[in-house]
Each structure stands twice: as structure tokens, then as C-alpha cells.
Amino acid sequence: MKRIKFKKIKFKKVNTKGFVNYLLSILISSVILALILISLPLTERVSSSATYDLINKSSMYWAQEYILKLDIQDQTDTKGKINKTKSILQSRLRKIGVEQSNISSYTQEEGEYIKISVQTTKEKELIDSVIKSPYIVNIVTRKNDVNYEDTENPLIPYLPENYNPTDFSGEDFRNVYVTKLKNSAGEYSYFALFKTWPWRSDWKKFLEEFSGQTVGVSIDGFVTPVQINAQDTTFAVSASTGEDKYAKVTDILYNSGNIPLSYSLEKEQEVVADIAEIDYIKLTEGILIAILFIYIYLLIIEKTPKDILLKSGLSSVLTVSGWITYLKVTGTPIDIFILAIEVIAIVVIIRLVTENIESRLNVTILLLVVAILGVLFGSGYVKMFTKDLILLLILSNLSLLICSFYITNVRKSLKI
Amino acid sequence: MNLIQNVLQNWSSYELAMEGVLILSILLISLLVIYISSKNKKILFLSAISLSVLMLVILIGIFVSNIILKIHITEIFRMIPILSLLFLLSNLGILLGFYTSKNKTKSFTFSLVRREYFKDSIKQTVFLALLGISTLLFLSPQTEVILSISILSSVITIWFTYWISRYFLK
């Protein structure tokens, strides 16, 4: 039988790498174009299927002034107590994320007052609860001669005069942990778990003494009855909320220090918010024109190499448009003046790093130090700016890498 | 003195402490990073002086705007030290990057570092000045003041650092 010989089919070696690079270049071009289109102002009007307009925080601001009258019974170290009260109030406001707050104290007709000016986008109800009550915590025990089950007077268990004071106050607890636990109805709600120092034997004795009984936690003239569990030494007080935001407020109020003075709200009035109004559209046009002219200047007058200008320009465009697209798509509200400062700062950084590529790591680390510490210790606008800066630094470094790859590939493909 | 009195009276100890901790921790950790990267005391001292001068220039800038230009100092002005630190640290980072990339080469001298630092500082100054001036037209007055003080204080400090580097980078 004759054997049939087939001709060997020879495949030409396909340049897979080149093909993938070519595809990637097309993909990057489309992504850059899409990001620019989405980030430009008013482009959301092109499509009705998606709403991705930039949310400007300026319309969300409200401003209010609160006057608190201090109740000074003990005249010793009044100045120190007022200063401590101011510090605690300020730390509470900062922890809740208030953008702008100013606290000052003054004396008027022999009375001591604290004036708090707040300008924020946070919910007014939350700010009110942080300012209006000092949250002075005291542990109280039941009186023997009071009928707490009196159905004709249901307020009896909640009034402090029906309880005996103890030596325990908010200062005796190292931390109050607010967490979700099952309540008597079997549903989850927030509770505040009081934690004292391990060496505080007096608290342990107190819990043992009142084991199985009801005591109370008095906060600003209102008592919450607490049943001490006979089995364990957990001291859990109902936070009277199931909502996360109110639980956060409760956590802040418990754990931001103990206000040494009692006070009452004397006056509160709405004031006009002082906002740095910037026209987002004009600003975008302005920054774009400014950057374009600067790059033309650098090219013609400064004789900066085209390569560097192209890379830094494209990276800047990619970073800024990527950032604005992120803000638009996620619906993150932003102060336009912060956005302007962010854009200016990142354009400067990208330009510097592109021209001094050997310094990229050093510059990024140093700037990350500023940003991380700003997030940890800063407040208000500084915290917002530095938080965004961390993301922008990551985004700018990624953009630089993508743009280097993209420019090299496009040059290879176009043979220029 | 109005500004200092105002700060002392109206700022709570919490605010003073937090602002102090923020600025001091940035200065100290930045210097630590600079020393770890360069392992050179001359660059460390130069950076320390540069950062201290920046803080002084910012303070003078805020004073001038408050007392002479009668600009009301608000919470937003806390952005100035952060912005200025960003601009100055990126400048020092470039000096550091050039030093670490060249210090092991045979032809390395500190005058080479100074020459390169001079070129980079000119470019950064031109870019900052142009960007600052061109965007001023579109920003709100408050943002303009913040940006102007930040850019001016960083540029002054950058050139002071270059001037004083002749005594350190020998």
C-alpha cells in the first residue's frame, strides 16, 4: 500500500507580543478618551441613561452658632475646666467629620459662656446631639424607698433624684465599646459595654455586690436602668438606637473625654455659610487653558524635551480625568476649591517626577508621609485633602507607568 | 500680635495639640525618611533647615495677610502648611533622588548635586509660578490667597535652600 505523504504545513511565527501590545494601546486610547469625556463638565447631558454629574458640596453646607451657658458650681480652676470643655467639644466635632468649627469662651454679666460656630455638610441632628448635651456619665444605684414599678408614675426609673450616687463616673472607664448585641426581644441593637482598667478591683466588687440587681447610668439628668447579669461581669447599657450613624455619635460621646462642667443651651441661630464659591465649568476651562499654555511655554521657551512634556502631560490628563470620573461615577460629593487645589498639586508633582524619574520613589514616599499623617492627625479640610492625596498619588504613579508603556507602543506601531 | 492672641484665646488645647502633632510628625518622619534614603548627614541638616525655614516663612505669610492685607484667617488656612510641605518635599525628594542615584559613581561631587538642584529648582519655580498665576483668575479669593501663600513660601524656601546648600554640600 502506497503511503500518502502530506506536506507539512508551516505556520508563520505570529508576533503575539506585538499584537497584544497593539490591542492594549487601542484599549488605553479608548480608556483615556472615555475618562476625558466623562470628566469634562456637562458631558452627562449627552446620555440620559447615566447620571454622573459632579456633586458639588457647596449647596449642602449649613452654618449655625450655638451659645452654651456653663454651670460653674465649683470655682476651683475654672479656666482649666472651660479649656477642657472646649477641647472635648472640638474633638467631638472633629471626630464626627465637621469641616469647619470654631469654639471660643467669654464672660458676660458674671456668667461663663462658650460660643460654637459650625459650618458643615453633616446632618444637623447629629451635630446637635454632639453639642447640646455634655454627656456627663455617672453610675447610680436604686433607693430602697422608691417604687420603681409604679404604673401611675412611669417616669420614676428614669429620674436621677430617685437614685443614690456612687463614686463611679465616666472617668473611671478606660473605654466604652459600642457594639450590636441581642436584646431581650432577640433582636440586634446597639449597646455600650463599659470597660474599666484590669486593676480596678472596686468596680469588680461593685458588680458583684449588685449582681442580679438593677442599677442605673445617669447621663445628663436621664437614667438608663441596667440589669447586672448574675453570670458575668459585663456591664452593657442600651444605646437606644439601631442606626449606625447614631451609634457612631454615641461612641464619640462616650469616648472623647469627660466634660468637667455641666452646661445648657442658651441660644442657637442659623448664620450664612461662608463658602469659597467657584464655578466648576469656568475652573475646568481655566485649568485646562493654563496647563496647555504652560506646556507650550516649556516647549518653546524652556526647550523642555518633547518626550518629557508628552509623558507628563498625558499622565496629568489621565490622573485628573480618572480622579474626576471616579468622583462622578461614585457620586462622591466634593468641595470644588479642594478639587482645584488637588488638581494643581498633582499636576506639579507629576511634572516634577516625570522629569526626574530617578526621584519618583523618594518623592512619592515623602508625599505619602505627609498624606498619611494628614489623615491620622488632621481634621476638616486637611483630612479631606490628604485622604484624596493618597489616592491621587497612587493614581498618578499608575498613570505614569501606563503612559510610558502607551507612548512607547504607539511610537513603535506608528514607527515614529 | 492679634493673630497669636486670637489663636491662643480661641483655639482649644485639643486643636493646638493636634496641629502641633501633625506638623511636627510630618517634619520628623520626613527627615527620618530623608536620612534613611541618603544616609548622609549633610543632606539631613540641609533638609532640616529647609523645613524649619518653610514653617517660619508660612507664619510670616499668614501674619502679612492678616495684619497688612487685612485678610480674615479661617480654618481653610490650615491647608497652607500641608500644600507648602508638598511642594518643598517634592523639591527635596528630587535632590535626594539625584544624590542616591549618583553618589556611588566615580565622578560624583556635591557641586554636581548642587548644579542639578539649581536646574530642577528653576524648573519647579517656573512651573509653580506659571500655574499659580494662570489659575488665580478662576479661583475664589480665599483659594487664591491659600495658593499664593503656599507657592510663595515654597519658592522662597527652595531658593533659600539652594543658597544655604553652598555651606552644607561641599
Image: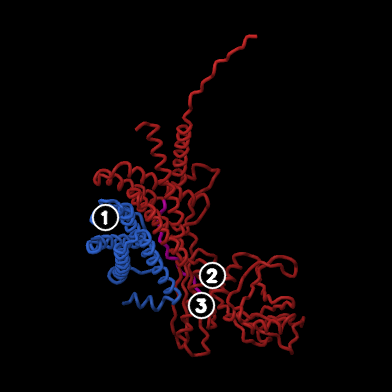
Residue A362 against residue A88 in the figure, above or below = above
User: Could you say which disc has been placed on residue A267 in the image?
Assistant: 3
Q: Is residue A280 left or right of residue B114?
A: right
Mark-to-mark CA distance, 1 and 3: 62 Å
Q: Is residue A266 left or right of residue B49?
A: right
Indicate the quadrant containing the N terminus of chain A: top left, top right, bottom left or bottom right. top right
- Dividing the picture into quadrants, the one containing residue A335 is bottom left
The 10 Å Cα crowd at callout 2, few under 14, some 14 to 19, many 20 or more, is: some
Where is residue A214 drawn, in percent x and y?
72, 81
- Residue in the foreground of this view, choosing between A31 and A47: A31
| Foreground tag (1 vs 2) | 1
Where is residue B50 drawn, in percent x and y?
30, 64
- Which callout, 2 or 3, points at the residue further toward the start of the chain? 2
According to the picture, the residue beneath numbered tag 2 turns out to be A127
The amino acid type found where label 1 is placed reads Val
Task: Please provide the residue range marked out in magenta.
Answer: A265-280
Residue A47 against residue B13 in the figure, above or below = above
In the image, residue A273 lies in the stretch drawn in magenta: yes
Tag 2 secondary structure: helix
Indicate the quadrant containing the C terminus of chain A: top left, top right, bottom left or bottom right. top left
Residue B147 against residue A226 in the figure, above or below = above
